[in-house]
Image (cartoon, helix red, strand yellow):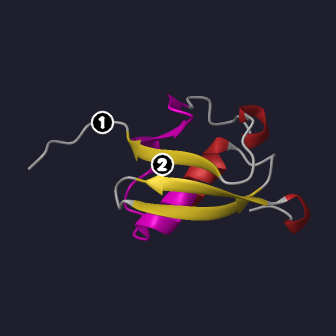
Amino acid sequence: MTAATDAFPVRVMVTDVWDTIVLSVGAMTTVAELKREALARALKSGSSPAGDYVLKYRGAAVTDESRTLGDLGAGANAPFIILPIKRRPVS
């Protein structure tokens, strides 16, 4: 996702598959890029559009996906979570 010189790892929990994806990113990586890459790796099918999910950092939804990880103050091993926007019924 970024040059190796300024890259650092982040952890992204994707609740649809209950798996944590580790990505190498940089401070200039946008939230949209992070979300798109984590969903692509976790879901593999590509059937769910990124617009159906919200990314949270430090418990808060990041609604402006053009913000960079540097803007958020995220550093090495920062934890993110991606979950569906709409709640799903329990079966």
Going 74% across and 39% down the picture, which residue do you hit? 68
For the N terminus, the quadrant is bottom right
Q: Amino acid at mark 1?
A: Lys
Image point (47%, 54%), residue name: 13
**Percent from the top left, x then y, of residue 49?**
43, 51
Task: Tell me the amino acid under the disc marked 2.
Answer: Ala
Q: Pick the residue in front: 11 or 37.
A: 11
When asked about the image quadrant of residue 73, the answer is top right
Tell me if residue 64 comes above or below residue 68 in the rendering. above
What element does badge 1 sit on? Answer: loop
Q: Which residue is mark 2?
A: 50
The mark that comes first in sequence, 2 or 1, is 2
Residue 48 is covered by the magenta coloring: yes
**37 vs 64: above or below:** below
Q: Position of residue 75 (x, y in %)?
A: 75, 46
Residue 70 position in % (x across, y down):
79, 39
Above or below — where is 52 with respect to 10?
A: above
- Residue, disc 1: 86
Report the magenta residues as a range.
38-61
Question: Residue extending furthest bottom?
Answer: 44
Q: Residue at x 62, y 29 (%)?
A: 64
